[in-house]
Image: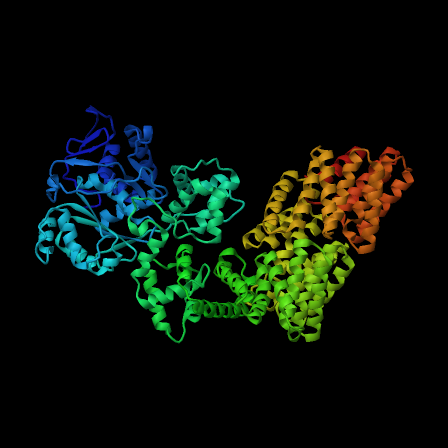
Amino acid sequence: MNSFGDANADDLSFGPFCLSVSQRLLAKDGIPVELGARALDLLVALTLAPNVVVSKKDLISRVWPDVIVDEGSLRFHMTGLRKALGDGQDGARYITTVAGRGYCFVAPVSRSGQLRHGSANVDFRHALLPGRLDRMVGREQDVLRLAEKLMAARMVTIVGVGGVGKTTVATAVAHHLAPTFQGAVLFADYGMLSDPGLVAAGIASMLGLPVGSDDVRPTLIAYLRDRRVMLILDTCEHLIDAIADLVTTIMQAAPQVFLLATSREALRIEAESVYRLDTLACSPDDPELSTEAVLSFPATRLFIERAAASGASLNLSDQDVRIVASICRKLDGMALALELAARRVESYGLVQTATLLDQHLTLGWAGSRTAPPRQKTLQATLDWSFGLLTEMERIVLRRLAVFVGDFTLDAALEVISTSDTDPPAVFEAIDNLVAKSLLATHPLGATMRYRLLDTTRAYALQCQSDEDRAGLAARHAMYYRRWLEQFGPDWPTLSTGPERLPYFVSINNVRAALEWSFGEYGNIDVGIRLAAAAASVFQVMSLFPECQRWSERALLAMDDASKGSIEEMHLQAGLGVSRMYLQGGRETSQAALTRGLQIAEERGNALDQLRILGPLSMFNLRIGDFNAALHYARRCSEIAATIEDSATVELGHFFLGNSLHFSGDLVKARIELEAAARSEPRPQRTPASYVGFEGKHLAGGILARNLWLQGYPAQADAQARRAISDAAKLDHSLTLCIALLGGIAVFLWRDDLPSAEEHIEWLISRAGLHFLSPYVSVAQGFQGEVAIRRGEVKLGIETLRRCIVKLHSATYEVFTTMLEISLVKGLAATGAFDEGLARINRTIENVETFGDLCYLPELLRVKASLLSSTQSSDEDVEACLRLAIGKSATMGARAWELRTATDLAVLWTADGRLREARALLKPIFEYFDEGLDTTDVKAAKTLLEALS
């Protein structure tokens, strides 16, 4: 057969159509259909090769053999052909587009006239095929790919874990291709057969052939030799050698026989083409994914359909859909497991079904009465697979259950090898378990990863002895402790999600090892070292609740001999940092960080001190003690400069630049921040890895704020967007939140409310996902400012009051000054001038006391506006504005200076002091050679034009 089927076929029938190839005529219900020559050529090419994807290149060469055309011509004539056929109308389906590959004719095609290979299928009276499901979920593309693969290769084995749906898909393929074989399809279920000697006899008896002799294969081959037949050989794994031998013989002797087998492992014969059937796709555990997107995944759809079919009354809320998705992930998208669990919903309800699965995977839940015995329960399915293993394979499978999620071959060999097993035997057993679909594999980076499905793991765990379980858990915990100590420092230097993924997938095993270490039968010493090594990794992943939990647990478990150790230092740092980000500036955070610094200073190691000084500077910023923050930042910068490592020096620049910015020293802050943001190539592992992030990734958002304050609004906007984009690529939520905080401030100062609102929503979503509640409160405060600017003043004031109280309660003061300014502006808009003045005076006092001086000029300007509204003298107002201008000039804050000068020029203009107003404003305005479309610059320009 060529790629376009059999050109000798005369009449082809599909649906209500009849196509005469020789007469080049298409008729519908006997009435000729008008069809252009090119469209007819396309139809002939596709119908002569039904269920086979024909590439665009092949179609063009067939239909336009001597003309050079582009794909546009092909698409044009294909559209006309589909329209003529009524493709897609009233459920009719003839031609499907396979993205990136070509087109496929998918409707059943019947042939009359001579076939090139002449076959006697018209007398095939022994067809036996199970009924297809009324609706098959998530396997449509598998069926099409398998049909194409089978027609091209003649022998395909569908390989997959028990319960994945191999038989269902094979049956669908058989029904799909049955018209191509004129119904000559035979389905042989070997699930109930245990004698290898009866493999050939089973097929022969179904065909009505005599089976009295010892070897019926000659008779069977003689019957099949000249026939065009499709054989489905179902459930081959327990008779694999005998079936492989028979299939090899058939493939060689009967060239028109097509074979589709299902098995938990491949036949491993030369003629075989393997199609691995994966479990159904499940939605990821992503709170930002819409309900509609979750419902689009095949596993979710199958569960819901099977639950409804079993009598469950489903009126799913968004939360219910999330529960369904979690069930699907728990069951790894395995079709049989999903169906069994879905049957429970009618009895237990959705929430209780999910709870039962979380507590223990119920392998004994019963399924359909008509299912084969091996598939009535998950237990039966796994018993069937387990019974086919060698003793060594069973030992290895039981021991592999100690791993949670993905693991490497190195981990497996080290953890499960004991005196009674040697590495080569373990390696061979793992290889066989993969071949038998009990162990899933997938490459990740340059390393192959292995994983037991949760259902298989639950089965293997219940087969473990107590002695096995204790020894495995201990070796597992010690392996991952060593793994963290060896590779943990690499994490912060991995700049993208894909780079971190090979490390990320091992964290579930670290969690399991921690649970065991601190459990009833665990090893506390291993647990303390494991928690100390994990602390910085949890920080890198923004898993602060886990960092806090295990740091606390390990510190409580320490004896006196362990006090002052490097492990305590790491744990105190982890506890202090995680509490700081989760709860704000609590005393417990400071106590932990201070204790960590004490240990670091006693040890006398510069890097150890840096581990604590940087977080201490950030801690003091958060509690609003900007003077102390600057003190720690200077120490951090000085020590970092003594270490010959660019990343460490970079962090020193960031901590110092960050503190200088909030302290109002904008010129020096910019120098430090630009030095931090300057990325240089460096080796993967650096001493700076301890912090959990890199200076260049944190500096961007603060640098954007600094640029705006210095009078570069366009550069600030560009820098803010670049910092946010770079942070988003890192897949590190804390870094992204810090970049968003800086960017949103710039957008608000520029009066770019649409950009501010967009990024505020992003900040709330990402910070909420990782329990960074102070960041959520700041973002909601920003929403209050936007509401005021949009005219919803009352709502904005209420929102800001609430958020400021929350931030004070959490002792998170970095942005409270900015929010106080917004609140005071809102109060002024409602005429609450007295409260506004009281708040602004208190804020100015705090700023001058604790060093948050970058906002001081704006605070003075807003105070002058309030004084003006309370009938204060012009002299008092002018004095306040002059002071603000002076502070702005000293700081180099051209943005605040322009705003204040504009206000003072307006005041002087009202008093008739036009020349003085112009002389004040003009030189400040002329400094701005960018951002001419921003609100502040346009206001100054308009006033200057009026003064001309």
Q: Within the image, what quadrant is residue 824 found in? A: top right
Quadrant assignment, res 64: top left
The C terminus lies in quadrant: top right
Between 121 and 896, the residue placed more toward the observer is 121
Q: Is residue 658 left or right of residue 409?
A: right
Is 773 placed above or below 290 here? below
Q: Residue at x 86, y 44 (%)?
A: 880
x, y percent for residue 355: 49, 48
Q: Can the viewer see residue 904 in this picture? A: no
Which residue: 32% across, 46% down?
142
Q: Nearer the viewer, residue 283 or 344?
A: 344
Q: Is residue 467 above or below residue 158?
A: below
The spot of residue 105 in percent (x, y) is 27, 38
> Where does the image place residue 940, in percent across and percent down from the top left?
76, 38
Residue 662 rendering spot, x and y as whole percentages = 74, 54
Q: In the rendered picture of this protein, how many numbered marks are placed on residues?
A: 0
Q: Nearer the viewer, residue 458 or 689?
A: 458
